[in-house]
Amino acid sequence: MHENRLELMKYRLESAQERLDSAKILLECGNYKDSIGRSYYAMFTGVRAILALEGIDYSKHSSVIAHFQKEYIKTNRLDKKYSKYISQAFQIRNNTDYADFFVVSREEAAEQYDKAVGFLDAVKNYLHDTQKKECF
C-alpha cells in the first residue's frame, strides 16, 4: 500500500473525529443545526478516509456516498444501516444549510450525533481490520 494513502487515511480519520467532537460541543451549546452539519461531516469524512486507501475521491458528496454504498454496503463490508445513516444525514444537512425556516430539535440533533458516533466507530473498526490484514 502506498504510504501517502495511509497517511491521507489517518489524516481524514482524525478530521472526522474532530468534526464529531465539534458536533457534540455544538449540541451541548444548543446549536442544533450546526451540530447536525458537523455530525454529517464526521460521517462523510470517515467515508473519505476509507476511500483514501483506494486512492479514490470525488468532487461531489453524492458521488462519494454512491461509491461507499456500492463498494462497502452492497458488498456487506459494512452494515446496511450505515447507508441509511449517511443518506439521511446528507439530506438533513442540506435542509439545515439551505432550507429557510427549517427547524431542528435537540432530539433530532442528538439522534444524528449518536448515529455519527456509531458510524465513525464502524469506519474505525473496518479500517483497523483492513490494516491488520495488510500486515499478514
Image (cartoon, grey):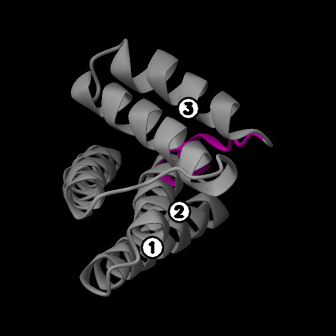
Q: Above or below — where is 134 with respect to 45? A: above
Magenta span covers which residues? Answer: 48-58
Q: Residues within 10 Å of mark 2 (few under 14, many from 20)?
A: some
Q: Which residue is mark 1?
A: 19
Q: Identify the residue at image location x=52%, y=57%.
A: 45
Residue 81 in view of the camera: yes
The secondary structure that most of the magenta stretch takes on is helix
Residue 79 in view of the camera: no
97 sits left or right of 121 in the view: right
On residue 65, which mark appears? 3
Q: Can you give x and y, in whole percent of width and height, for residue 134 in the image?
A: 35, 47
Q: Which residue is mark 2?
A: 6
The kind of residue tagged 2 is Leu
Q: Is residue 50 magenta?
A: yes
3 or 1: tag closer to the N-terminus: 1
Q: Residues within 10 Å of mark 1 (few under 14, many from 20)?
A: many
Give the alpha-carbon distance from disc 2 to disc 1, as whole Å. Answer: 20 Å
